[in-house]
Amino acid sequence: MARLVNWLLKLTAVGVLLSVLSILVVYFLASQSLPEYEKERALPGVTAPVEIVRDNANVPHIFGSFGASDEDVYFGLGYAHAQDRLWQMTVLRRTAQGRLSEVFGERSIESDSLMRRLDIYRLAQQSVAAQSADTLAALRAYAAGVNARLFEVNESALGRGAPEMFLFSAPVAPWQPADSLALLKLLAVQSSTHMQNEILRTRTSLVLEDPDRLRDILPDAPGNGISALPEFTELFPQMKRFAALETSQPTFWPLPERGLSSASNAWAAAPSRSAAGGSILANDPHNSLTAPSTWYLARLELATGGIIGGTLPGIPVVFSGRSNAMGWGITASFLDDQDLFIEQLNLGNPEEYQTPSGFKTFRTRRAIINVKDAPPITTTLRWTENGPVLPGGIFNLSSITPPGHVVSLGWTALSPADTSMTAAIDLMRSHNVSEAIAAAEGFVAPSFNLVLADQEEIAMKTIGAVPQRSSRHQSKGRLPSPGWRRENRWQGRAAYAANPVFRNPRGGILGNTNNKLVDRPFPNHISYDWGDSQRIHRWQRLMQSREVHTRDSFIEAQQDTVSFAARTLLPLIGADLWFTGEAAPEGTPARQRQTALNLLAQWNGEMNEHLPEPLIYAAWVRALQKRLIEDDIGTLASAYPRVDPLFLERVFRNIDGASAWCDIRQSALIESCTDLSRLALDDAILWVNETYGGTLESLRWGDAHQANHLHEALGSIPVLRYFVNIRQSTSGGDNTLQRGLTSGKGLAPFTNIHASGYRGVYDFADPDSSVFVTSTGQSGHFLSRYYDDMSQHWRRGEYIPMSLDENLARAAAVGITRILPQ
């Protein structure tokens, strides 16, 4: 027995030793790819010495020496991006190319199939020739910088450049100018959801028995809008109403869910509304939370002067930032730049489709998708005159496609002569608002609202190509339409001068929170589907509550967590519940309902992570929307995972008969909205008790509203996920200026999955007092101290200095990389 115990002890000791050795080996291999920032190195591709000065937040300040050109500075940016974000750049490029399956196997086949059909990489290659000479030079220099880092990694055996490379065999080809153009097009893929909106609108219309209820569940933004739409069954009589089935989203899916496209805030104050007499600009673009962040901070010292702000790895552009003379920021414009076309096949020859001038043959090409550990897949790509033919699996597209038809996508981003990169680089070199607006004319996709401020002016201009539609379009671009009808087809691009512009308003303040910008009649409408219509009301209150503003008041607005939606909805849904309940014993559902109502009656709508009221409110309205819609649209209810305040307001104010949603069609009784509100509150309290336990007073919104920054490749791997994912308790919510959009799904429906990945506030009374921050950190290497060092700043509403003072950068440098010509 003693001998057995000894053997077991020896085996245990050996096992522990082997585990420790394995951990040390893994750590050693992974740490080899940690960048060294303090060095001097001769590398191919640079024409004069370049210095990359890393300040104490690891923000690279890139300087060319005497005799260096702008191209050398772009070289430095490419090198810095590849040092810190090589894996991220590799995955993004493979996504655009439709080549993820070579690395991740069968789970990414659907993503690759879609990207091959959209063909954005070939379109990017064709768009290289459309760029200006200066932009081509910048793209080539940037690519040379990336490739210099690849050369260094290979020559010095620097751990394959990123720890993920040891787990996933992903050979990295040299970077090309077309790769950066493809990533800009991929940004458009990830930013537009009008296709998803058209599909959901159609599917919902086929499920609802009363077509008038469609405008309740998919309401237009407040204000004058479209009065009526044809039913989809009028456009396609062969389609019948059906019980919708919802499907899950594929892994690595590049298209955003409805509600998860780009969102953002941006506002500016003219010198007349600034306490210090200089214009101020604030910007916080929103995106899916990832580890590392989508954003990367950088400073470039160009011939036109220094610029500093937020870049996207793989693209040599500062998308939101400033120079000493001007600042710029972006918000999602929600421009309707996509249309779905139902294409009728020739029954005698399925290789042909109907056009206004008769049947034409599809433009086709075969593509081979190589799959790791599986046979390659050959797919046929088809294009019509309207655009690429889409697979039926996208958002259940097959369920709304009549027999004998296919669906194609018209989209401005599918341009082979896309000059967006040239426009973006020219914008960075602009010295004032007028130059910036002129420079942005060549922007095609994605579309943004560009907010600008210089020393004297402020402005906002919608940039991006606007499709020119016919005033006779059958569905006004809101439903998939017959592609063979001439009136449904696009007629080119609208003039840039017609894009909305707001310049030097009398009140001295302008801004956008993805709200409706203009109310123009179709086809000059810009969009029918806008972003959140609630945040703008809170922003107006904050802006008008002060006669003059400061950098700090703009920061305060960025960090504001008061929900205008909560303040509006609670008096409606609780109107007949407050102070009407009977006395109830402690611990009973009725007593808990009274406790919840008492808490909410004293709440000011602040979605503070430390309070219980935001969680009670969020659970209540979620349960309420679920009860309202499930018996009307069945399983399609899962396509509406987040609460729409406009829908609930229409129902409880009975706008155009919307209170009909409160009656449960499946029951013999006629339920009132008060009945459903009371039942939903009980549902919410039960769910909260089962999920979190304790008393209602002890709940914390932050326990439910955890920001989940996921590593896309490693975030689901056991054990490893604890090192690569970043989780934080956060304030804010779906409809607050400090927006933290909830998932609406699964066992943790209030997880914060979409928020500001970048925040910046630029003050031109004292430009070097400007500040910025990202949601994680500069490095994409999870062993780096710069992987998550900004995340706590971001969570607490703190920023880091955004200075163009070279001496400050050098004084606090954590490393200086000097690159010499080879």
Image: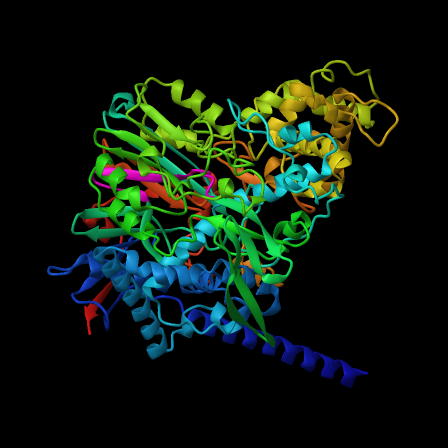
The stretch drawn in magenta includes residue 329: yes
Residue found at the very far right of the displayed protein: 668
Q: Is residue 15 above or below residue 35?
A: below
Main SS class of the magenta portion in the image: strand
Q: Is residue 602 above or below residue 449?
A: above
**Residue 289 screen position, x and y as percent:** 51, 48
**Residue 653 screen position, x and y as percent:** 65, 18
User: Which corner quadrant holds the N terminus?
Assistant: bottom right
**Residue 538 screen position, x and y as percent:** 48, 24
Q: Is residue 581 left or right of residue 274?
A: right
Kindly tell me whether residue 499 is visible in this rendering. yes
Residue found at the very far bottom of the displayed protein: 3
Q: Is residue 42 left or right of residue 149?
A: left
The stretch drawn in magenta includes residue 512: no
Residue found at the very far top of the displayed protein: 580
Residue at 47% over, 46% down? 191
Q: Is residue 78 above or below residue 683?
A: below
Q: Is residue 431 left or right of residue 684?
A: left
Looking at the rendering, the stretch of residues picked out in magenta corresponds to: 320-337
Instruction: Count every numbered label the image shows and give the total.
Output: 0
Kindly tell me whether residue 603 is visible in this rendering. no
**Residue 626 screen position, x and y as percent:** 72, 35
Residue at 44% over, 59% down? 120
Nearer-the-camera pick, 811 or 226: 226
